[in-house]
Amino acid sequence: QVQLVESGGELVQAGGSLRLSCAASGRTFSSYYMGWFRQAPGKEREFVARISWSAGRIFYADSVKGRFTISRDNAKNTVYLQMNSLKPEDTAVYYCAATNVIATKGSSYDYWGRGTQVTVSS
């Protein structure tokens, strides 16, 4: 009932910046918590950041804190992930997800996008 489409992933040099977007359609977007996750080759999918519908509650994984910024524009049905000071270890497929409850575990999210590839070169 909620469709999510990520975009913005590309090849970038270490130390560079990138902004990912997640466009949502279907049920009321503003009623959902939104999260970003990532999965690198050979690793489990991990939590990156989440944001409440009003953007008043935001939480980041320690690995990205201070470098990444999550935001949302409910009028545009879009959530963003601004990534600065990128490192090679940030290389992964990035996914956005939606849930009705506050959560950092992927199993708690009800809807997922198909992902967008981010590659950070040394």
Image (cartoon, grey):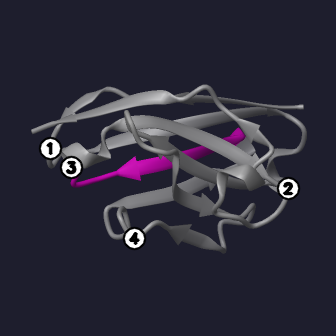
| Distance between the alpha carbons at the discs numbered 4 and 3 | 14 Å
Q: Are marks 3 and 1 in contact (CB under 8 Å)?
A: yes
Q: CA distance from mark 3 to mark 1?
A: 5 Å
Neighbourhood count class around disc 4 (C-alpha, 10 Å): few under 14, some 14–19, many 20 upward: few
Kind of residue at disc 3: Lys
Query: Hey, which residue is sitting farthest front in the picture?
Result: 42
At label 1, the amino acid type is Ala
Query: What residue sits right under mark 4 in the picture?
Result: 62
Task: Give SS at disc 1.
Answer: loop
Estimate the spatial distance between the alpha carbons at disc 3 and disc 2, rounded to whole Å: 33 Å
Q: Which residues are magenta?
A: 76-85
Task: Determine which of the numbered discs, if any, sits on residue 14 in the image.
Answer: 1
Q: Quadrant of residue 121?
A: top left
**Gap between marks 4 and 1, in whole Å?**
19 Å
First in sequence, mark 3 or 2: give its number.
Answer: 2
Give the left or right position of residue 92, taking residue 47 as reference: left
Q: Are marks 1 and 2 in contact (CB under 8 Å)?
A: no
Residue 110 lies in the magenta stretch: no
Report whether residue 93 is seen. yes
Dot 2 amino acid type: Ser
Q: Which dot, 3 or 2, sits closer to the camera?
A: 3
Above/below status of 89 relative to 70: above
Q: CA distance from mark 2 to mark 4?
A: 26 Å
Residue marked by disc 2: 31
Mark 3 burial class by Cα count in 10 Å: few <14, some 14-19, many 20+: some
Quadrant in which the C terminus is drawn:
top left
Q: How far apart are the two marked residues, 1 and 2, measured between alpha carbons?
A: 36 Å
